[in-house]
Image: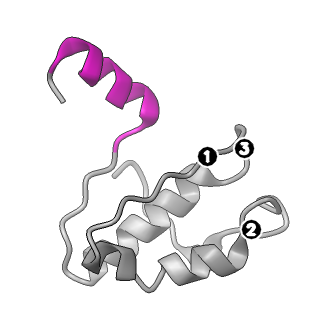
Amino acid sequence: MPAVKTLEQFDWAIGSGAPKAQIQELAHLTFVERAENVVLLGPSGVGKTHIALALAHRAVMAGHKVRFISAAEMMLQLAAGTA
């Protein structure tokens, strides 16, 4: 992962569009146990990467394997057929 971020560090004032209750629910990692995907959508600067890294950090701390990839990198890999 490019950086360690936590939900405790997240500035909810800047990321005011982020649904705090839903993000806190994701922090319980039950979506991992259910093998569900999480997609974070929104404009630049609202905290999507911070939230993704924070959830990934929680998952790693809980013993799960994590792969972090940006949408741009994923599209490059899909276009190249290496994903």
Q: Position of residue 58 (x, y in %)?
A: 38, 77
Pointers 1 and 3 in contact (C-beta within 8 Å): no
Q: Could you say which disc has been placed on residue 49 in the image?
A: none
Q: CA distance from mark 1 to mark 3?
A: 11 Å
Colouring scheme, one of rainbow, by chain, secondary structure, one colour: one colour
Image-based side of 77 in relation to 5, left or right:
left
Q: Quadrant of the C terminus?
A: top left
Q: Position of residue 64 (x, y in %)?
A: 20, 74
Q: Would you say the residues marked 2 and 1 are in contact, meaning their CB atoms lie under 8 Å apart?
A: no
Residue located 26% across and 68% down the image: 35
In the displayed structure, 19 sits above or below 62; it is above
Which numbered mark, 2 or 1, is in the foreground of this view?
1
Q: What residue range appears in magenta?
A: 69-81
Q: CA distance from mark 2 to mark 1?
A: 17 Å
Q: Nearer the viewer, residue 56 or 81?
A: 81
Q: Earlier in the sequence, mark 2 or mark 3?
A: 2
Q: Which residue is under mark 2?
A: 11
Q: Residue furthest top?
A: 80
Residue 45: percent from left, percent from top: 72, 44
- Inspect the image, locate mark 2, and give the three-letter code of the amino acid beneath it: Asp
How many neighbours does mark 3 have within 10 angstroms: few (below 14), some (14-19), or many (20 or more)? few
